[in-house]
Structures are given as structure tokens and as C-alpha cells.
Image (cartoon, rainbow, N blue to C red):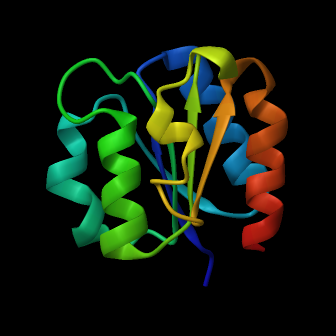
Amino acid sequence: MSKRIAVFEDDEDIRYLIELMVEQAGFVVTSFESGVDFEDNLGELGFDAVITDYNLGTGPDGYEIALHVTFNLEVPCLLHTGYPEEDWPEHFKSGALGENVTVSEKEIGLLEVEDFLSKLS
């Protein structure tokens, strides 16, 4: 059975690219455009991994999703952001998210998505 990946991304174009990458890597993808969907769906649907943007507009942000994923569901999470690394909040750099969370800049994010997916296979 294929692994299930949840994608949280408010930018439709980026969400579409990530969906394609996830599907081409042989995973089943379910996408959400805001953090509002997170509380209703994440734990209930049994995802094997999560890819989330940091800024999701309404509802929980990517940081809150990553915290829940790493400490409650114990599945890998890729948290990507449009902020350059030097502008990341301290909790991104301090390891507060745990070892199951990878943080990346969106500009190099597609390479990070490929790498993240390859580790799940």
C-alpha cells in the first residue's frame, strides 16, 4: 500500500507542483490550502508524512502543524518557508521542532521535497 502524504500549501501553483512530485514519487497525496483543514483531518486520516508551508493564511500555521506532527503523530514533516534562513524564527534553528521536522526555504524547496520523499520510500 502506498504511503499517504498530506500537503498544506496556500499558494495554488506551489501546491500543484508539490502534488505532482508526490504522485510521481509513488505516494498518495491529499492537499489542503489552509491550516483550518488541519485540525479536522490530520490525525483522523492517518498520514505517513506531512509537507507544509509556514504561512497558511487562516487557522494554524505550518509551525503549529509541524509541532503536532512531530510530537503527537510521530511522522516526518517538511516545513518550508519563503523567509530566508537568516530571518527564520529562533525556534526553527534551535531544534525545538524535533528531529522528524526538516525546515527549508521555498526557493530551494522543490529539491528539498525530492530529498524528503526519497527518504520515505
60 is higher (above) or lower (below) than 106: below
Snapshot quadrant of residue 43 = bottom left
From the viewer's side, name the closer residue of 53 and 100. 100
35 is higher (above) or lower (below) than 30: above
108 is higher (above) or lower (below) than 65: above
- On the rendered image, what quadrant is the C terminus found in? bottom right
The x, y position of residue 120, in whole percent, is: 72, 70
Snapshot quadrant of residue 67 = bottom left
The x, y position of residue 96, in whole percent, is: 45, 53
Q: Give the residue drawn at x 60%, y 28%.
A: 16
From the viewer's side, name the closer residue of 59 and 3. 59
Q: Give the residue drawn at x 83%, y 62%.
A: 118
- On the rendered image, what quadrant is the N terminus found in? bottom right
Horizontal side of residue 36 vs 81, given as left or right: left
From the viewer's side, name the closer residue of 70 and 118. 70
Q: Give the residue drawn at x 55%, y 53%.
A: 95
The x, y position of residue 73, in whole percent, is: 36, 74
Q: Give the residue drawn at x 73%, y 30%.
A: 109
